[in-house]
Image (tube, rainbow, N blue to C red):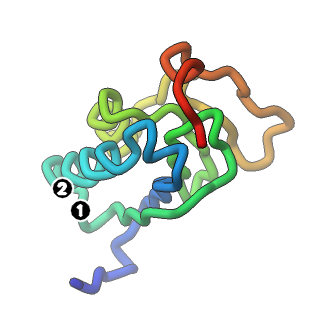
Amino acid sequence: MAIKNLTDIKLHLFMCNGGACCNLGAQEATDIIRNTIKKLGFFDAVHTTKTFCNGRCNQAPIVIEIPKGNWYKNISPQYAEEFATRLVNNKPIPNKHKLYTYGNASINYETLESNTNQKTS
């Protein structure tokens, strides 16, 4: 495994690959996000980490952005490339994919309709 120069890291993505997230395509979304970051030339500035369950199975797949403290939901394989492109180019993520930001008083509990009928365990 290559060792990254941590002093170049500007963004760290924690991508859930727990059971519910994987049932909804998290592994494929993770691969797409990583490939998009490389393709766009941000490999040195963005670090990605696969995690296990982040406790938000009803909004799966989940991605957490550090240092901003943003939690994103429903990051499906179909949306993963656009998501990664928006993040690295500092473009807004649509509200339907925002779950929570550290320090906020509320959580966006709404789920995308496509996830409401899918198994989450």
Horizontal placement of 109 versus 105: left or right?
Answer: left
Quadrant housing residue 91: top left
The residue to which callout 2 is attached is 38
How packed mark 1 is, by other alpha carbons closer than 10 Å (few <14, some 14-19, many 20 or more), is: some
Q: Which is nearer the eye, 119 or 11?
A: 119
Q: Which is nearer the eye, 90 or 62?
A: 62
The residue to which callout 1 is attached is 43
Residue occupying the point 17% across, 47% down: 40
Q: Position of residue 33 (x, y in %)?
A: 30, 47
**Above/below status of 104 relative to 102:** above
Structural distance between the alpha carbons of marks 2 and 1:
5 Å
- Badge 2 marks a residue whose secondary structure is helix
Horizontal placement of 38 versus 118: left or right?
Answer: left
Tally the numbered discs.
2
Question: If you read the primary sequence from the N terminus, does the residue marked by circle 2 or circle 1 appear first?
Answer: 2
Q: Which is nearer the eye, 103 or 82?
A: 82
The amino acid sitting under disc 1 is: Phe
Q: Which mark is residue 13?
A: none
Q: Position of residue 78 (x, y in %)?
A: 30, 28
Horizontal placement of 99 versus 61: left or right?
Answer: right
Residue occupying the point 86% across, 37% down: 105
The amino acid sitting under disc 2 is: Lys
- Badge 1 marks a residue whose secondary structure is loop
Which quadrant, please, contains the N terminus?
bottom left
Quadrant housing residue 57: top right
Q: Which is nearer the eye, 115 or 81?
A: 115
Q: Position of residue 82 (x, y in %)?
A: 30, 31
How packed mark 2 is, by other alpha carbons closer than 10 Å (few <14, some 14-19, many 20 or more), is: some
Residue occupying the point 62% across, 22% down: 111
Outermost residue on the left side: it is: 39
